[in-house]
Amino acid sequence: MDTLHLPAELSIYTAAELHPQWLAWARRDGVEHQDARADGTAVDQVDGAGVQLLIALQRCLAARGCTLHLHAPSRPLREACTALGLAGWLAELQHGATPEAA
């Protein structure tokens, strides 16, 4: 399983730069119908735009028949998702389910 290491900052200030990089990672050859893994350990700053970017990644992968597994989401990432009402969605990503509510 290929791993995408999430950066320290997931925010409106980094979303424009990260979005095309993440889409390219999600659309790379040989990814269809495979699991993908994102490591959230390093995230120490996150806002709504950063969470939205993570949702976009999950949906892009789901469209290719892939499941996104989120490994070790940091405390700031968990808190941001909780504040946005997405704690259940985050839990589903941690367990590798295909989130429906995102």
Image (tube, rainbow, N blue to C red):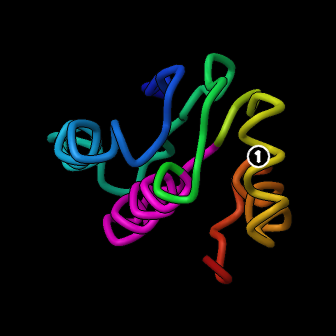
The residue sitting at 63% across, 68% down in the picture is 98
Amino acid tagged 1: Gln
Q: Is residue 36 above or below residue 63?
A: above
Q: Is residue 58 above or below residue 101?
A: above
Magenta-tinted stretch:
51-69
From the top left corner, tell me how far across and down residue 24 is, in percent: 17, 42
* Location of mark 1 (residue): 94
**Left or right: 92 in relation to 27:** right
Estimate how packed mark 1 is, as few (under 14), some (14 to 19) or many (20 or more) residues with alpha carbons within 10 Å: some
Instruction: State how many labels appear.
Output: 1
The residue sitting at 43% across, 26% down in the picture is 2
Q: Residue furthest bottom?
A: 101
The residue sitting at 49% across, 49% down in the picture is 50
**Left or right: 69 in relation to 4:** right
In the depicted view, which residue is nearer to us: 47 or 99? 47
Q: Is residue 42 above or below residue 11?
A: above
Rendered-image quadrant of the C terminus: bottom right
Q: Quadrant of residue 75?
A: top right
Q: Residue furthest front?
A: 13
Give the main secondary structure, helix, strand or loop, of the magenta stretch: helix
Instruction: Please tell me whether residue 58 belongs to the stretch shown in magenta.
Output: yes
From the top left corner, tell me how far across and down residue 101 is, in percent: 67, 82
The residue sitting at 49% across, 62% down in the picture is 52
Instruction: Please tell me whether residue 1 belongs to the stretch shown in magenta.
Output: no
From the top left corner, tell me how far across and down residue 18 is, in percent: 28, 38
Per the image, label 1 sits on a secondary structure element best described as: helix
From the top left corner, tell me how far across and down residue 73 is, in percent: 74, 33
